[in-house]
Amino acid sequence: MFRRKKRNVTLDSNVLISYVISKKDDSIVKKVVTKSVTDDRLMLTDVIFDECLRHTERRKARVSKEEMSGMLKELSSEIIKITPVPSNEELAERYKIRDKKDLKILYSVEMTDSVILVTYDDDFFDNVEGVKAEIMYPADYLREDERKGLLKKLFGRRRFGKIFISDIRSTDSISDKFRHRGDRRPPSEMFPSAKFRHRGDRRPSAEGCAFLWLWA
């Protein structure tokens, strides 16, 4: 299993609301919240907490205010206070996002030094600026360790990095590293450039291999 240090993670209010509403213990959102609490550090601010409570005031809300408050407090030993929050005009100068209502979420991410923001909101994936945190959908956050663990198991970080750190600019030298003794095909055929690959070509490209090293 892939292991790493705990990170500060912020869950958007839509993720937390879905967690409270969901009745399935094996749902993705339940697993996401569990991972943020056990494997990482959940950063629950008073801004996000209050936004979740405001959801219960809607006409068709499926949970009560008391139920929402109780379940959220069970996730975190303390609600991180970051209020008072700057005005939307001030926040708009610091961050860039399509929906101005989400400015406070970005402010929460920055104030808690979160390295990951998990959200269902597509607006956060449309040229957001001003925060260094990686923004993920819940399913991607849940599967990230599986992907990184698989890459490390298949290639090994030291060996994989050693191959590509010196050859990242050379297609021929990269492909030569992976040629077996009986292979008489030219390097360009083994690792075609991404610019010249046809749609059905499933072979790894030199650019793709370099990307895998950087991503791992």
Image: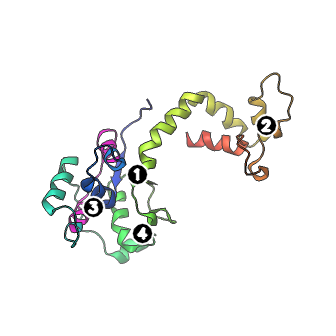
x then y, percent, for residue 74: 18, 48
x then y, percent, for residue 193: 77, 47
In space, the residues marked 2 and 1 are separated at their CA atoms by 36 Å
Q: Tell me the element at label 2.
A: helix
Residue 44 painted magenta = yes
The residue identified by callout 1 is 138
Residue 40 vertical position relative to residue 150 in the rendered view, above or below: below
Specify the label residue 190 is tagged with: 2
The disc labelled 4 sits on which kind of residue? Arg
The residue identified by callout 3 is 48
Q: Tell me the element at label 3.
A: helix
Q: Residues within 10 Å of mark 2 (few under 14, many from 20)?
A: some
At horizontal 77% and vertical 24% (from top left) the residue drawn is 180
| Residue 44 visible in rendering | no
Looking at the image, residue 131 sits to the left or right of residue 196; the answer is left
The residue identified by callout 4 is 94
Residue 93 vertical position relative to residue 186 in the rendered view, above or below: below
The disc labelled 3 sits on which kind of residue? Ile
Question: Badges 3 and 4: C-beta atoms under 8 Å apart?
Answer: no
Question: Badges 1 and 4: C-beta atoms under 8 Å apart?
Answer: no
Which is more foreground, mark 1 or mark 4? 1
Residue stretch rendered in magenta on the structure: 32-54
x then y, percent, for residue 142: 41, 44
